[in-house]
Image (cartoon, helix red, strand yellow):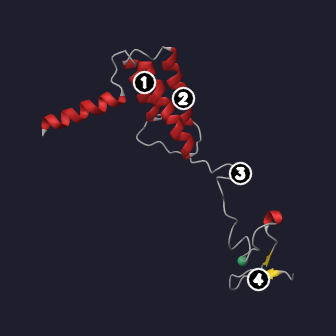
Amino acid sequence: MASTRCATPGCRRVVGPPAGGRGARRRFCKVCRPPRVRPDRAGPAPAVVEVVVTGSTQSEPSLVIHYRQALHEAGALGSPAGSQVMHLVGLLAYGSHTAAGAASLSREIRDVFAAATRGRGAPDAVDELRSRREAKAARS
Ligand SMILES: [Zn+2]
């Protein structure tokens, strides 16, 4: 088969054979139509999302500050579970994560935080939400 030119008008690049030698022959060159990224296949890792933490003027991300404060108030900062929370929070705040990675890390932090503060008199997220809702209902 003769070499094919890219189907984009004005583009004179030669379209190579399909990568891997299977599938339909490319109609466009790789410059005009970059190969599709398929995150569900093994291959290059998904793009890492750089998370910009806002709402903090200190050198520490607000996430770290707030978790440390919450653990301190619950008297759980020095406990093993409290240390684990701070470690995970540090990973989330300072690391680079995919959206999926950040989401699972967040869930893990919530779970460990709940375990660290359980029975220590600190309101957990659900209790806090409920009391906020009740306060709002009482006002109206
Ligand atoms: Zn082209």
Q: Could you tell me the amino acid type at mark 1?
A: Ala
| Distance CA(mark 3)–CA(mark 4) | 29 Å
Pick out the residue farthest to the left.
140
The residue under label 3 is 44
Residue 3 drawn at (x, y percent): 84, 80
Secondary structure under tag 1 reads helix
- Mark 1 and mark 4 in contact (Cβ < 8 Å)? no
Q: Nearer the viewer, mark 4 or mark 1?
A: 1
| Quadrant hosting ligand 1 | bottom right
Q: Nearer the viewer, mark 2 or mark 1?
A: 1
The residue under label 2 is 88
| Distance CA(mark 3)–CA(mark 1) | 36 Å
Q: Could you tell me the amino acid type at mark 4?
A: Arg
Determine if the C-beta at disc 2 is less than 8 A from ligand 1. Answer: no
Q: Which mark is residue 114?
A: 1
- Mark 3 and mark 2 in contact (Cβ < 8 Å)? no
Pick out the residue farthest to the front.
23
Residue 21 drawn at (x, y percent): 83, 66
**64 displayed left or right of 126:** right
- Mark 4 and mark 2 in contact (Cβ < 8 Å)? no
The residue under label 4 is 12
Residue drawn where x is 25% and y is 33% of the image: 132
Tag 1 or tag 4, which sits nearer the N-term?
4
| Distance CA(mark 2)–CA(mark 4) | 52 Å
